[in-house]
Image (spheres, rainbow, N blue to C red):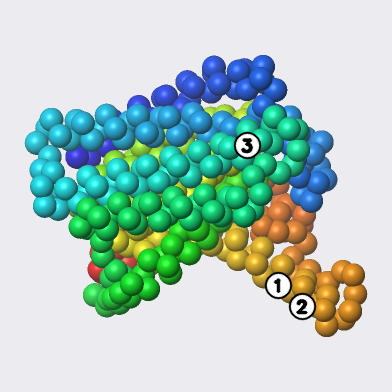
Amino acid sequence: MMITSSIAAAAAFLITWLAGIFLIPLLHKLKYGQTILDIGPKWHKAKKEGTPTMGGISFIFAVSVCFAVGMIVFAFTGADFSGAGKRELVVSVSGMVMAVLFGFVGFLDDFIKVRKKRNEGLTPIQKIILQVLIIAAYFATIYISGFASTVISFPGGAQWDMGLFYYPVMGLGILYIVNAVNLTDGIDGLCSSVTVIYAAAFAVISGILGMFGETLIAFCTAGALLGFLMWNFPPAKVFMGDTGSMFLGGIVCALGVGCKTEFLMVIAGIVYILEALSVLIQTTVFKITKKIHHTKEGKRLFKMTPIHHHFEMSGWSEIKIDAVFTTTALLFGALAVVFSMMM
């Protein structure tokens, strides 16, 4: 299992890296350049406007193909797809399909932006409706297959059976995390680097738990993103776009929920969670202080959100932000691995 997963990771790296040689010039030719939001740091518009976007297509293709081939190899090398093996097949394939569908929503969003040359693609409500439908389909597939579990496990053996409340609560959790990963993709290399660490952590966690499908997904994702970083590391030659970041949000959830380690998903994904939380805190404080003081402008707790922009506005370079956030992801990813040994 580990040998096949490692080979799949290496293949995903090469496919994504080599894809950039052909994809980036093509995106330039099609004039699929990033339109920078006016609400971001002013220097982003000058330096990043026009950089090709939708580069996430490269690693979506690489992860999907290498995962599919890897599962076929598992089948021909004696993997047992009955009992627990059947669960692995259903849950991992369902997770991959969910991630690809999220990527498709991101693709629609990016495509509208680049074709209409505007800052926004799909409306927020359109995105949410599509995402909710994808989440519902994911849970329905697992439920119909007979592998649904409403139990959340914690370190030390503690468990909480949420019953039917599991589905709306976890559905909202997936919705939050997918969009949180999307928010993390705000500067060159950040989302890619943080997600490499997350995938590496879950490669270990799923390996410990003996879940070969999720192990394969994690290895393929880590390998593909390392290949993408060859093009996305500051200064980026291509952006992943919502196409890539929403796909990665789906992968993050497919690993955490698929392994039945929802608690560890929160621990290992702390960077994503804090990124989205900073936006919620900023918006809440702004609205409350605006109402209290009866002014047109409310107070801002941060210089700009998501939180990586706060540090950027404070004078941090993109590389420093990448390093600090990735180190944070590494520490919490390691903590999640330790916790997995106690479950």
- Residue 321 x, y percent position in the rendering: 63, 51
Comes first in the chain, label 3 or label 1: 3
Q: Which amino acid does label 2 sit on?
A: Ile
Query: Is the Cβ of the residue at disc 3 closer than 8 Å to that at disc 1?
Result: no
- Residue 175 x, y percent position in the rendering: 50, 58
- Residue 301 x, y percent position in the rendering: 75, 70
Q: Which amino acid does label 3 sit on?
A: Asp
Against 289, residue 185 (above or below) is: above
Q: Residue furthest right?
A: 295
Q: Nearer the viewer, mark 3 or mark 1?
A: 3
The answer for how far apart the CA atoms under marks 2 and 3 are is 33 Å
Comes first in the chain, label 2 or label 3: 3
- At x 87%, y 69%, the residue is 297
In this orientation, which residue lies closer to the viewer: 87 or 8? 87
Considering the numbered disc 1 on the image, is that residue within a helix, a strand or a loop? helix
Q: Quadrant of the N terminus?
A: top left
Give the crowd class for mark 2: few <14, some 14-19, many >=20 residues within 10 Å: few
Give the crowd class for mark 3: few <14, some 14-19, many >=20 residues within 10 Å: many
In this orientation, which residue lies closer to the viewer: 171 or 279? 171
Q: Which residue lies furthest to the bottom in this view?
A: 292
Give the crowd class for mark 1: few <14, some 14-19, many >=20 residues within 10 Å: some
Against 57, residue 317 (above or below) is: below
- Residue 288: numbered disc: 2
In this orientation, which residue lies closer to the viewer: 141 or 222? 141
Q: Quadrant of residue 68?
A: top left
Residue 108 left/right relative to 212? right
The residue that label 3 is drawn on is 110
The residue that label 1 is drawn on is 284
User: Residue 311, can we see it?
Assistant: no
Query: Is the Cβ of the residue at disc 2 closer than 8 Å to that at disc 1?
Result: yes
